[in-house]
Image (cartoon, grey):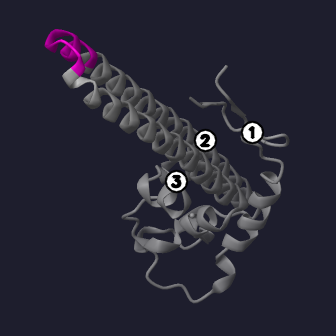
Amino acid sequence: MFFLDLLIFSTVIDNKHHEFINSNRYNYNILGLHNSFKISNVVENDKIGIIDFRYILKSSNAMKLLGNKFLTLEKEINEKIKQKQILLKQKEESLKKLKNNLAESEYKKRVKLFKKEVFKIQKKYKDERAVLNKSFQKIQKNIKDLLAQIIKDVSINKNINVVLLKENVFLFNNQSIDFTNEVLELFNNKTKSMKIIINSPK
């Protein structure tokens, strides 16, 4: 079983791929962003900024690295399961061949032990998958939290009082208020030293 440490950033707190981004809805309240925000309620004197949060996550090196690592580990688990299934199948066939040579009580005893072994193996890999999924969800949350903080810092430096999610904006004529690419570049720089540490079972 893999024991996954939390994400380590050497500088700041330091596509599973596109599914990672779409599977969990992020709480954008940390940015002061609301899905049903009405632009008509924005005070005219407030400086507005537009950010494409999903695009940054999907395009960022950090999320790509995380997705690739997830797929690699998932593939390793699947391969181990496949090999174990082959061995169990062979064991099952051998057990069937012994049926006529064993007393009925002894055969039933061996069948019971075999089923118990199969159940134990199934549980082992189920738990391993659960640990993998939970660990990566936690790492993903750390990535999102870091991105949210960067957006907040950039908006403060730009004297932006209101940040809107691009997906919720019907129209904006001034492209300069979209600072998505600037944040993406900064986010990539902040996470370029990111490492995912994996300890193999002893």
Q: Which residue is mark 1?
A: 13
Nearer the N terminus, badge 2 or badge 3?
Answer: 3
Q: Disc 3 marks which residue?
A: 32
* 156 to the left or right of 38: right
Amino acid marked by disc 1:
Ile
| Mark in the foreground, 1 or 3 | 1
Amino acid tagged 2? Ile
Say left or right for 40 vs 138: left
Tell me the crowding category of disc 1: few under 14, some 14 to 19, or many 20 or more residues within 10 angstroms, Cα based.
some
The CA distance from mark 2 to mark 3 is: 23 Å
Q: What element does badge 2 sit on?
A: helix
Q: Is residue 71 magenta?
A: no
Sooner in the amino-acid sequence: mark 1 or mark 2:
1
The part of the image, by quadrant, that contains residue 8 is top right
Q: CA distance from mark 1 to mark 3?
A: 21 Å
> Callout 3: helix, strand or loop?
loop
Q: Which residue is mark 2?
A: 139
Please provide percent x and percent y for residue 23: 42, 55
- The numbered mark, 1 or 3, whose residue comes first in the sequence reads 1
> Local crowd at mark 2 within 10 Å, few (<14), some, or many (≥20)?
many
Give the total of numbered labels.
Answer: 3
Measuring 50% from the left and 59% from the top, which residue is drawn there? 21
Q: Residue at x 61, y 46 (%)?
A: 145
The picture places residue 149, in percent across and down from the top left corner, at: 67, 49
Amino acid beneath label 3: Gly
- Nearer the observer, 47 or 61: 61
For numbered disc 1, what is the local secondary structure?
loop
Residues at badges 1 and 2 in contact (C-beta under 8 Å)? no
Where residue 153 appears, as percent x and y from the top left, is 73, 53
Q: Which residues are magenta?
A: 101-110
Residue located at (39% from left, 69% from top)? 38
